[in-house]
């Protein structure tokens, strides 16, 4: 593989001006060897039937089969291409990380941001995919978050606890927090198998990171990374049971 002109790309967008702009920026990148374009999912599937593609830059909101549905189809390919969502909206972030997309780029697309996205795709394809590394990636999916105007992929393992803020959720990490447009209940359902437990209608925490459960003036609280988080009465018994079971599992190892 050379360092210029090796990436085969498909750009998909139902809005001609947006597709033209995306195609222009992609053609200008020296790592792109071949560029196909499609105005909808049906046309994209025809391209993918006839040509080998390394990465699909994909709009989400399109008539007919939308970008999210097309991405689910692409995941079932024997050799699925990398997927980069290019969208004006952030409400697809959670579904995007569930699908394991390479990146999530917000419109209007900037050349520098697109270059970073291509770099991520290239890095993922150049580094040999060891089975153990693939397994770790599946166990630790990423979620797109905004940071200083840039969307980056945050590993789920970096999240210490989650706080509800209306229809949004704030993901707390060891070095800050990120607001994502997804209800807390949705994350509680999707992250239950990863050890996240509901302790309150407004809080979801990683069970293994609970350092302390104690009775305070207003009821029980847990301590995670030095922060005290309230435990509602309805969740107290279940939380205690889970902590006991987790401790027994550690003793039996």
Image (tube, grey):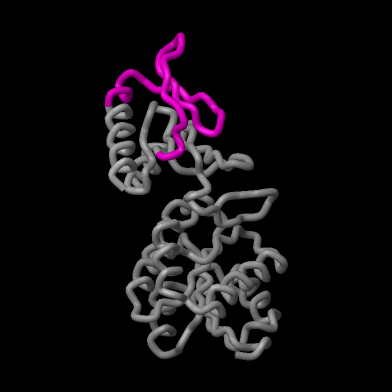
What residue lies at 40% left-to-right and 43% top-to-bottom? 187
218 sits left or right of 57 in the view: left
118 sits left or right of 249 in the view: right
**Residue 178 in the image: above or below residue 144:** above
**Residue 23 in the image: above or below residue 159:** below
What residue lies at 54% left-to-right and 73% top-to-bottom? 124
Whole-percent x, y for residue 71 in the image: 40, 67
The quadrant in which residue 196 appears is: top left
Specify whether residue 222 is painted magenta. yes
Q: Which residues are magenta?
A: 208-237
Relative to the observer, which residue lies in front, 169 or 17? 169
What residue lies at 34% left-to-right and 42% top-to-bottom? 250
Relative to the observer, which residue lies in front, 63 or 120? 120
Whole-percent x, y for residue 161 in the image: 48, 37
What residue lies at 44% left-to-right and 31% top-to-bottom? 203
The quadrant in which residue 242 appears is: top left
Whole-percent x, y for residue 36 in the image: 53, 83
73 sits left or right of 117 in the view: left
Relative to the observer, which residue lies in front, 81 or 44? 81
């Amino acid at each position: 593989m050379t360092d210029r002109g090796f990436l085969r790309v498909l750009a998909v967008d139902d809005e001609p001006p947006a597709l033209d702009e995306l195609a222009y920026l992609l053609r200008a990148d020296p790592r792109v060897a071949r560029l196909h374009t499609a105005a909808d999912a049906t046309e994209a599937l025809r391209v993918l039937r006839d040509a080998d593609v390394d990465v699909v830059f994909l709009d989400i909101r399109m008539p007919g089969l939308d970008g999210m549905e097309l991405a689910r189809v692409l995941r079932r390919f024997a050799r699925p291409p990398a997927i980069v969502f290019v969208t004006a909206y952030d409400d697809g972030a959670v579904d995007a990380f569930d699908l394991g997309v390479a990146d999530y780029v917000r419109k209007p697309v900037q050349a520098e941001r697109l270059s970073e996205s291509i770099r991520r795709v290239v890095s993922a394809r150049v580094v040999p995919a060891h089975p153990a590394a693939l397994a770790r990636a599946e166990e630790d999916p990423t979620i797109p978050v905004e940071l200083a105007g840039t969307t980056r992929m945050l590993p789920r393992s970096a999240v210490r606890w989650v706080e509800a803020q209306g229809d949004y959720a704030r993901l707390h990490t060891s070095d800050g927090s990120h607001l994502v447009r997804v209800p807390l209940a949705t994350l509680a359902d999707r992250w239950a198998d990863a050890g996240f437990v509901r302790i309150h209608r407004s809080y979801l925490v990683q069970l293994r990171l609970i350092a302390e459960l104690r009775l305070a003036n207003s009821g029980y609280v847990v301590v995670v990374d030095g922060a005290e988080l309230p435990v509602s009465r309805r969740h107290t018994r279940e939380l205690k049971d889970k902590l006991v079971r987790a401790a027994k599992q550690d003793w039996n190892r």
